[in-house]
Image: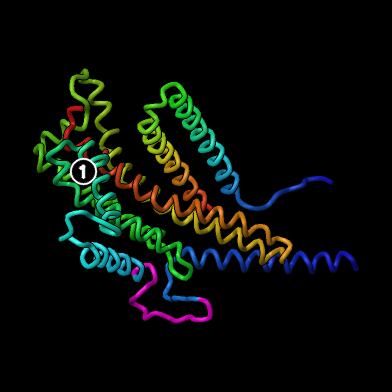
Amino acid sequence: MEGASMTGSIAAVGAGIVVVGAGLGIGLIGSAAVQGIARQPEAAGKIQVNMLIAAALIEGVAFFCAVICFLGK
Amino acid sequence: MSTNTTAAIASTVQQKIDSVQAFVMHHARNSNEFSLPYLRFELPSYISIHGLMVVLAAVLLLLAFGVFYRKKALVPTGLTNLLEMFVVFIRDEISIRYLGDKDGRRMTPIFCSFFFFIVVMNLLGLVPGFAAATGNVSVTLPLALTTFVFMVFGAIFKTGLLGFIKGLVPSGIPWFLAVLLFPIEVIGVVIKTFALTIRLFANMVSGHMVLFFLLGMIVIFGMKAAPVIVVALLIYGLELFVAFLQAYIFTLLSAIFIGQRYHPDH
């Protein structure tokens, strides 16, 4: 078999890479937040609020790039 | 002979995939049809379903806060208590915390409007047959532009035009850093607005699309894919959470951005 080729659009590959970035980022935030709560359980409320804010910001960037991938296809 | 049937099966699967994709794309967009199970009617060309949902959300909120809210009771119960819980949360944790006491109390109505309006529009999207109006950029962009107007013109009213321009960069940094930071901050104001609209829009649209594609698996693969219903129910629960979370995040980020422009000294 020579010259095997794939068809489709590379925007889907881009969307997959965006998901990897977002997953890693939010996973890091989650792990830091959980460690912070483990060290000081009485600050759990504040840590949770900050974790949600940071996760939403990262997800915002991820969605922004996902929309661009959609438009690209 | 077997290649013919394989090709025939593949083409019907491809047709099913195409029809599922067409269904999902049609439901993610705005259209003039309003369809419930077994009942479909075509709206006049000047009413679209997202517009209908915006008006419906406004009417529901007016009813909840105007008619069903008991102002005269000294001790709030039921719906009054629930609404007051949310309003007090927005006033204390979002508005006063990021804008100070005086401005916080004055700006609480706009943040309550953001939160309740967005949450009701998001929740209406989860009702079968209705659509999420926040899944349309024409709805989220004006909401973010309201924040933009407060960020720019509200800050100009408060601190003066020169104060606004000086407040864009932190005080007490050397002049070459300030010159470098100034364009970034100016673009940052626009990008924050843009990010607010895209975050809300993409969260709502993607949630619905995931749900529809998952259920479309049943169309493509037949009843063998029936266990996908459990996953769809879990994702529906996640969508419920995301509806509230995205409204909270929009309100919170608006308060943070407006607070940064109103009180630029910290």
Q: Nearer the viewer, residue A43 or B257?
A: A43
Residue appearing at x 61%, y 62% in the figure:
B215
- Asked whether B242 falls inside the magenta stretch, the response is no
Q: Which of B92 and B182 is in front in this view?
A: B92
Q: Which of B149 and B75 is in front in this view?
A: B75
Apparent side of residue B35 relative to residue B140 in the rendered image (left or right): right
Location of residue B50 (image quadrant): bottom left
Apparent side of residue B66 relative to residue B212 in the rendered image (left or right): left
Apparent side of residue B210 relative to residue B243 in the rendered image (left or right): right
Residue appearing at x 52%, y 33% in the figure:
A27
x, y (%) of residue B87?
25, 50
| Vertical arrangement, residue B99 with respect to residue A71, above or below | above
x, y (%) of residue B131?
43, 66
Residue indicated by mark 1: B151
Give the crowd class for mark 1: few <14, some 14-19, many >=20 residues within 10 Å. Answer: many
> From the image, which quarter does the C terminus of chain A lie in?
bottom right
- Asked whether B44 falls inside the magenta stretch, the response is yes
Amino acid type, residue under disc 1 in the picture = Met
> Farthest top residue?
B174
**Magenta part of the chain:** B37-51
Apparent side of residue A72 relative to residue B76 in the rendered image (left or right): right
Q: Which colour scheme is used?
A: rainbow
Element at badge 1?
helix
Q: Chain for mark 1?
A: B
x, y (%) of residue B76?
23, 55
Residue appearing at x 50%, y 29% in the figure:
A31
x, y (%) of residue B81?
27, 54
Total numbered labels:
1
| Vertical arrangement, residue B259 with respect to residue B135, above or below | above
| Vertical arrangement, residue A42 with respect to residue B33, above or below | above
